[in-house]
Image: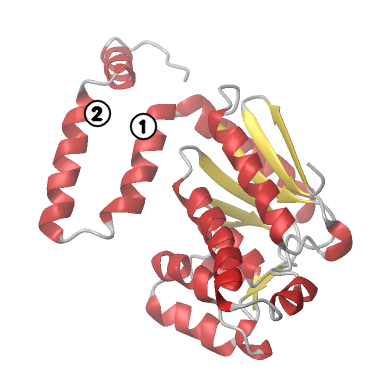
Amino acid sequence: MEFIHYEVRNRIGYITLARAAKRNALNYEVVSELKRAFAIAEDDEACKVVVLQAEGKVFCAGADLEYLQQLQQYDYHENLMDSTHLMELFRYIYTLKKVVIARIHGHAIAGGCGLAAICDFAFAVPEAKFGYNEVKIGFIPAIVMVFLLRKVGEAKAKQLLLTGDLITAEEAKACGLINQVVPAEELETAVNAFAQKLCNQNSRQSMEVTKEMIARVQGKTLEEGLQYAAEMNAVARSSEDCRRGIAAFLNKEPLSW
């Protein structure tokens, strides 16, 4: 792949945005390669947890504006196809069977902030800025909005999306957009340690099912959600990982996943 790199080390799959000259901006090709990289990671038995990271000074500046300008010459159906292409990437990351951790070493703006929001966990340096500035250029934060509302709630989403203002990493952490703020020199170590903890301490199957349930249960009514939860609970009890985990706990045996 030209713009995305993928490798696995110690059960961690690293997906790296490598379009630094364009501040890792998203266009059709970058989105296509990201979809391909996440598909590879999901099917890769050597990979248990995924880290999304980037080269250059910026994590991701969002949509490539030159590319968007070209799309203005397209008709509605052509634009819908391109927009659907991006939507599929965001949905795929959000519903990926494996946990995804964002390692944010620089600014995450617009669609780049959307990438940060859809990851299951996000670690960032104090210098990183976050925000959705689409309204400042006459555009709309349409696709990222769906995930941001789930992540931070309506009040904070309105503040971010309607003002278009950028916020600091500490402010992003305070509103729940990211999880941790880590000094730049410690970021890689902190992310790797957290990823290794998930690899070593948690069942792959349990994390997969829990992540799937989080994505699905929010769209259900109370009764539907409870029934779904009861059914998934019953299924989990007979899983091999559950049998193994409970037996190890009761027998006071060390357990490594």
Q: Is residue 99 left or right of residue 47?
A: left
In the displayed structure, does residue 153 sit left or right of residue 178? left
Disc 2: which residue = 236
Label 2 element class: helix
Q: Are marks 1 and 2 in contact (CB under 8 Å)?
A: yes
Using the image as rendered, state which of residue 253 and residue 48 is in the foreground.
Answer: 48
Q: Position of residue 231 (x, y in %)?
A: 16, 37
- Count how many numbered circles sit on residues in the image: 2
* Alpha carbons under labels 1 and 2: distance apart: 8 Å
Label 2 amino acid? Ala
Q: Does the rendering let one see residue 120?
A: no
Q: Quadrant of residue 104?
A: bottom right
At horizontal 62% and vertical 51% (from top left) the residue drawn is: 102
Decide: few, some or many residues near mark 2? Use Cα within 10 Å; few <14, some 14-19, many ≥20: some
Q: Work out whether residue 246 or residue 63 is closer to the camera in this orientation and state it.
A: 63
Residue 188 location in percent, x, y?
Answer: 73, 44
In the rendered structure, find residue 206 and report the number of the disc placed on it.
Answer: 1
Numbered disc 1: secondary structure: helix
* Badge 1 amino acid: Ser
- Which residue is farthest right? 21
Q: Quadrant of the N terminus?
A: top right
User: What numbered label is drawn on residue 23?
Assistant: none
Q: Position of residue 97 (x, y in %)?
A: 46, 38
- Where residue 117 sits, quadrant-wise, is bottom right
Report whether residue 245 is seen.
yes
**Nearest to the observer: residue 54 or residue 5:** 5
Residue name at image x 12 percent, y 46 percent: 227
Quarter of the rendering containing residue 129:
bottom right
Would you call the spot at circle 1 few (<14 residues within 10 Å), some (14-19), or many (20 or more)? Answer: some
* Dot placed on the residue nearer the N-terminal end, 1 or 2: 1
Percent of width and height locating residue 57: 84, 61
